[in-house]
Image (cartoon, grey):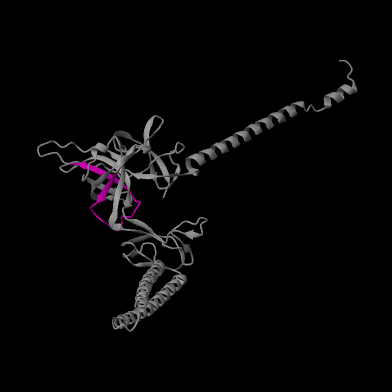
Amino acid sequence: MGRVEKSDLLHQLRIDRSEERTRTGGSRVWIGVVVALIIVAALGAGAWWYFSGGKAFEVEAATAIAPSSSGSGPMAVLQATGYVTARREATVSAQITGTLIKVMIEEGELVEAGQVLALLEDTAQRASLAQAQAQLRAARSQLVQFSSQLAQNRRDLKRAEDLVGRKLVSQQALEIARTQVETQAAQVDSQEKQVELAQAGVQGAQVQLDYCTIHAPFTGVIIAKAAQVGEIVSPFSAGGGFTRTGIGTIVDMDSLEIEVDVNESYINRVIAQQKVEAVLDAYPEWKIPGHVIAIIPTADRSKATVKVRVAMEQKDARIVPDMGVRVSFFEEAPKSGAAAPPPPKGVLVPAGSIVQRDEKNIVFAIDGDRARMRAVTPGQNMGDLRLVEGIAAGTRVVKEPPAEIADGSRVTIKK
């Protein structure tokens, strides 16, 4: 064995840290990878929460309804949606510009035709009326004066005529007396016109005063109160938002009817006086009989629809303007002996509520504040509705599902 130097022994006793640094560096790399994966997972979970459950989609809702069965009665040949409208609806305003000193209406209040709804400040109008009345009294007094003078001139003319006949006055005096009578008669006639003018002034001032009292044009229900005491109202818009153009809106509830948009491809199934059945979105179990009033002779180019007016044969306080409604149009039942077709299976939903997910036809049913996917089997079209199987009647569905909506997404219903 050779001699071992002391320096070699010291070299062997040194700690080699290169391997330790290698192990430490590798551990740090793995820790960084794990942290990055955790961040990515958190972001993915956050995105999933946002699109699937966290984000609330504002949507319109529609109710699935069962198609009317035929049986021995009339058969539904078309379904369409629309709204309750009022044929007599007016925003009541003042006919002059003025400041409101009293408003005597509230929303939901029934008012009669001619009932006072509001009062305007009328100090200026009363002063104008008093001035016009004073001018009328002055004109009448002057007319009395001129009429008295005319009567005197006529008596003078008669005396002059007697005196001329007895050769006591000249012919010139007689002519002067006649001229005075004619002049005074013309002045009386002119003053009578002034009296008529003053009377018209009084009537005009009275009309302006009457404009300060706003009356109901017809019997109806107040659906909106648009102005308060102290505000300025005017029949003209002054701009800037400081002048009201209306005091309130009144609706004649007896004039309520339904307007529906019928696809022009199916308008040939609708005729005047055709029997219909209306179902309000707010009361899906309540069926209201009615009939077609008229088909509006124009089409909406953008929607390819024709508007149809429908009368409701039942009036009820629950029916209010702008309610959503679904209308079934009927044809007459088949004659006795003819076989009636079986009622169609499924329910009717808006055609736009049916979308495709993973090559399947689905609708999004509304369950509380969540949207749930339901697979359906589409059938025939009935106007803007489509027959589907897979959900029950009365199910509320999303009318136009957004592309991002998913099963379980939060939804809020548009008002």
Q: Residue 374: in sight, yes or no?
A: no
Q: Residue furthest front?
A: 167
The picture places residue 217, in percent across and down from the top left corner, at 33, 62
Residue at position x 36%, y 57% in the image: 90
* The magenta stretch spans residue 166: no
Q: Residue 216: in sight, yes or no?
A: yes
The image quadrant that residue 107 belongs to is: bottom left
Q: Is residue 159 left or right of residue 95?
A: left
The correct choice, above or below, for 34 with respect to 74 in the image is: above
Q: Nearer the viewer, residue 83 or 244?
A: 244
The correct choice, above or below, for 171 with respect to 112 in the image is: below
Q: Is residue 26 left or right of residue 292?
A: right
Q: Nearer the viewer, residue 65 or 320?
A: 320
Q: How many marks can you see? A: 0
* The magenta stretch spans residue 328: yes
The picture places residue 283, in percent across and down from the top left corner, at 30, 51
Magenta segment, which residues?
Answer: 308-331
The image quadrant that residue 400 belongs to is: top left
The picture places residue 105, in percent across and down from the top left corner, at 39, 65
Q: Is residue 237 left or right of residue 390?
A: right
Q: Nearer the viewer, residue 292 or 409?
A: 292
The correct choice, above or below, for 376 with respect to 230 in the image is: above
Instruction: Say which quadrant the N terminus sits in.
Output: top right
The picture places residue 382, in percent across and down from the top left corner, at 28, 37
Q: Residue furthest left?
A: 337
